[in-house]
Structure formats: C-alpha cells, structure tokens
Image (cartoon, helix red, strand yellow):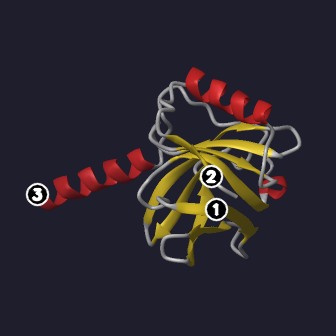
Amino acid sequence: MKALSLTAVTLLLLVGCTGLPEGIQPVTGFDKDRYLGTWYEIARLDHSFEEGLSKVTAEYTLNEDGSIKVINRGYNAEEGKWEQAEGRAVFVGDSDVGHLKVSFFGPFYGSYVVFGLDEDYSTAYLTGYNRDYLWLMSRTPEVSDEVLEAFKARAEAEGFELGELIVVEQ
C-alpha cells in the first residue's frame, strides 16, 4: 500500500510540474516551425539554475521523432566559462497550443508555457508550472524599452511578482 501511495504522490507531483499556473492561458495557433531557432533571454525571474548567467540563449531544433531539442546556453562570468544544458520538449496536448513539457533530467519534465507571442514570432512570454518562473525571450539580443515595459505590464496583469526580475546582459 505504501508503494502505491508513493507512486500516486510521485505521479501527482510530476503532473503538477507540467501543469499551468492558475489563470494563465497558453497561446493558441502556435506554429512549432516558426518557433524553432535561436531566442535571446531578455529578462527573467532568477533561479539557481541560471543564477549569474549572462548572454543566455535558447536554441530549438526539431528531433527526428518530432520532439524539440532544446539547448540553453549562458556565460558564467564569475567562473569565466560557458554553461550549457540540453533538453527535449514535447507538447502536453495539441501541437497548436503553446504548452510544452521540457526535460533536462531523464524522465522528469517541467512545464514550458508560451502565454504571449508576437504575430511575427519576434518576442515570447514564458512561464513554468507556477508564477515563480517568468521569461521574456526575443529573436534579437536587445529589445526596445516599449517591448520590455509591455512585457512587465502583461506579467503584472497576469499576477507575476516582478520584484526579483532581472534584465539579462547580452
């Protein structure tokens, strides 16, 4: 009985990590092919896995099995070296909805939610399974003040706390 309970709790935790923050809606009409390529991290809520990193990029390419290869890369100035993580993303539901799950560690997946996306796929607003995760990504290493302010306004309207938001040095 304990093994079954542990399995049920583990499954619940894994599902919770690929869910959506309450009230956040992923974009619809998502076009995976247009999303592929290199994105620059413009702003983020900092976390231990990215702490101290600058020049952060994410590159998305298609794997043979239809999943998406994810390569996140950033420069750690304190250690004087580049850091890189490779992962795999798959859609949680329909492939035209910007809700994916990404794994960098074997069978463990985390939610990847595109909740804002320009028509021309030039900027994207991302979150995880809760509002502790937030990113502004762009096809270019810099964005205008207007783009950054629009992102902040949307994030605040969606209930994100921006006190720890950092603008990433590119």
Would you say the residues marked 2 and 1 are in contact, meaning their CB atoms lie under 8 Å apart?
Answer: yes
Q: Earlier in the sequence, mark 3 or mark 1?
A: 3
- Hey, what amino acid is under mark 1? Val
**How far apart are the alpha carbons under marks 3 and 1?**
43 Å
Q: Is residue 97 something one can see in this rendering? A: no
Q: Residue at x 48, y 34 (%)?
A: 21
Would you say the residues marked 3 and 2 are in contact, meaning their CB atoms lie under 8 Å apart?
Answer: no
Residue occupied by mark 1: 56
Say what secondary structure mark 3 lies in: helix
Q: Residue at x 24, y 58 (%)?
A: 7
In the picture, which quadrant includes the C terminus? bottom right
The picture quadrant where one finds residue 99 is top right
17 on left or right of 135: left
Residue occupied by mark 3: 2
Instruction: Give 29 or 114, whichever is nearer the viewer.
Output: 114
In the picture, which quadrant includes the N terminus? bottom left
Q: Earlier in the sequence, mark 2 or mark 1?
A: 1
Mark nearest the camera among 3 and 2 is 2
**In the rendered view, would you say 19 is above or below 64?**
above
**In the rendered view, would you say 148 is above or below 45?**
above
Image coordinates of residue 120 in percent, x first then y, are 89, 43
**How far apart are the alpha carbons under marks 3 and 2?**
46 Å
38 on left or right of 24: right
Tag shown at residue 168: 2
Say what secondary structure mark 2 lies in: loop
Say what secondary structure mark 1 lies in: strand
Badge 3: how crowded within 10 Å, few (<14), some, or many (20+)? Answer: few
Badge 1: how crowded within 10 Å, few (<14), some, or many (20+)? Answer: many
Q: Residue at x 76, y 34 (%)?
A: 145
- Hey, what amino acid is under mark 3? Lys
Image coordinates of residue 137 in percent, x first then y, are 70, 49
**How far apart are the alpha carbons under marks 2 and 1?**
8 Å
